[in-house]
Image: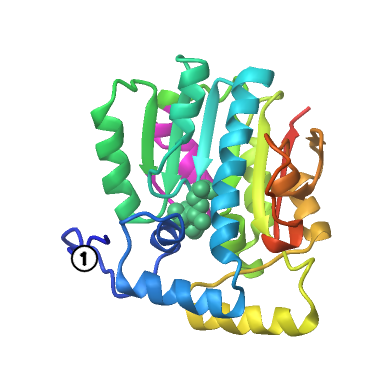
């Protein structure tokens, strides 16, 4: 059941991507405007809920891989979303309790929930910052970031299902480059992103129209456009592909890649 009492001072009459995503994941921190936006997207792109669930599973697999197989101990998760099952700090700290995580999101509702979550546990090395991906300098220099993360040591920069909200005029490649430039060699970049690769011209037109109606700007990108985020970095196996085929834990019951239309990849900064 959804919570309809908005926290004081928060405008829930306009949809927000964090709450809409929460709705698709079966959460309760969403409001009518978010659900209406979700329905508008689903009209043009029915598998969107499946994509959201698959994306969250991708994020969990990546963090487990980075923590266990690679030895990453610091995470900067921008566009973190509302806390849900299997948050980055929970997965990372279950494998390596000393892991440090800074969550960043621009939705004030995420801030409220994240602070509650972080206050509730004994996660001394986890912090939350309300900030915008479009202002990397503010994220990198905020005391919340610099007190938890040692940027002279490797960090995993997580940009999971967030860059498709950055339209071309907002310079997504420059933003990613600016963030990566601030990270130490041996850092990792993790990205997942909605793609138009599998859509026919008709489906693409329908999906674009649905996104317009949804009230949240959205930019699908092709594999070639996705690959540009990793320029100068070393892609880790299996490289760029559907989030479904990124180190899957099981081979059963996976929908076809085009059923979720989301690309994912992990790369290392040399
Ligand atoms: C689809 S959710 C993804 C959440 C999480 N990364 C995941 O993959 O499960 C996108 C998140 O990005 C956040 N977001 C969108 N635009 C942003 C921006 N410009 N700066 C920071 N966060 C942003 C939204 O508030 C939302 O929480």
**Residue at disc 1, secondary structure:** loop
Q: Is residue 162 left or right of residue 219?
A: left
* Location of residue 35 (image quadrant): bottom left
Identify which residue is drawn at 79% across, 78% down.
200
Q: Is residue 94 left or right of residue 233?
A: left
In this orientation, which residue lies closer to the viewer: 43 or 191? 43
Q: Residue furthest front?
A: 252
Question: What crowding class fits label 1: few (fewer than 14 Cα within 10 Å), some (14-19), or many (20 or more)?
Answer: few
* Location of residue 167 (image quadrant): bottom right
152 above or below 192? above
Using the rendered image of the protein, determine whether residue 141 is visible from the camera's viewpoint.
Answer: yes
- Which coloring applies here? rainbow
Which quadrant is the C terminus positioned in?
top right
* Location of residue 154 (image quadrant): top right
**Magenta stretch encompasses residue 137:** yes
Residue 16: percent from left, percent from top: 40, 65
**Magenta stretch encompasses residue 162:** no
Residue 193: percent from left, percent from top: 66, 56
In this orientation, which residue lies closer to the viewer: 170 or 26? 26
Which quadrant is the N terminus positioned in?
bottom left
59 above or below 37? above
Instruction: State which region is magenta.
Output: 130-146
Mark 1 highlights which residue? 4
Residue 242: percent from left, percent from top: 75, 51
Q: How many discs mark residues in the rendered view?
A: 1
Residue 86: percent from left, percent from top: 46, 36
Q: Is residue 253 left or right of residue 116?
A: right
Using the rendered image of the protein, determine whether residue 215 is visible from the camera's viewpoint.
Answer: no
Identify which residue is drawn at 29% across, 36% down.
117
Q: Is mark 1 within 8 Å of ligand 1?
A: no
């Amino acid at each position: 059941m959804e919570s309809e009492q908005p926290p004081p001072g928060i405008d829930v009459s306009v949809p927000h991507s964090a709450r809409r995503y929460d709705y698709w994941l079966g959460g309760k921190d969403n409001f009518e405007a978010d659900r209406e936006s979700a329905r508008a997207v689903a009209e043009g792109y029915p598998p969107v809920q499946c994509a959201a669930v698959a994306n969250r599973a991708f994020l969990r697999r990546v963090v487990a891989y980075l923590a266990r197989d690679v030895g990453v101990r610091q995470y900067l998760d921008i566009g973190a979303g509302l806390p849900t099952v299997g948050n980055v700090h929970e997965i990372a700290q279950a494998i390596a309790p000393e892991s440090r995580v800074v969550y960043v999101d621009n939705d004030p509702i995420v801030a409220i929930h994240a602070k509650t979550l972080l206050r509730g546990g004994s996660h001394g090395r986890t912090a939350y910052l309300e900030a915008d991906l479009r202002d990397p300098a503010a994220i990198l220099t905020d005391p919340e970031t610099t007190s938890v993360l040692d940027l002279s040591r490797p960090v995993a920069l997580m940009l999971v299902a967030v860059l498709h909200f950055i339209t071309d005029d907002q310079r997504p490649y420059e933003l990613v480059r600016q963030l990566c430039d601030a990270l130490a060699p041996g850092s990792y970049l993790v990205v997942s992103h909605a793609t138009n690769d599998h859509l026919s011209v008709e489906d693409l037109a329908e999906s674009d129209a649905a996104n317009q109606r949804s009230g949240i700007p959205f930019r699908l990108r092709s594999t070639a456009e996705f690959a540009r985020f990793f320029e100068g970095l070393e892609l880790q196996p299996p490289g760029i592909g559907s989030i479904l085929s990124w180190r899957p834990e099981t081979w059963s019951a996976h929908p076809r890649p085009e059923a979720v239309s989301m690309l994912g990849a992990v790369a290392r900064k040399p």
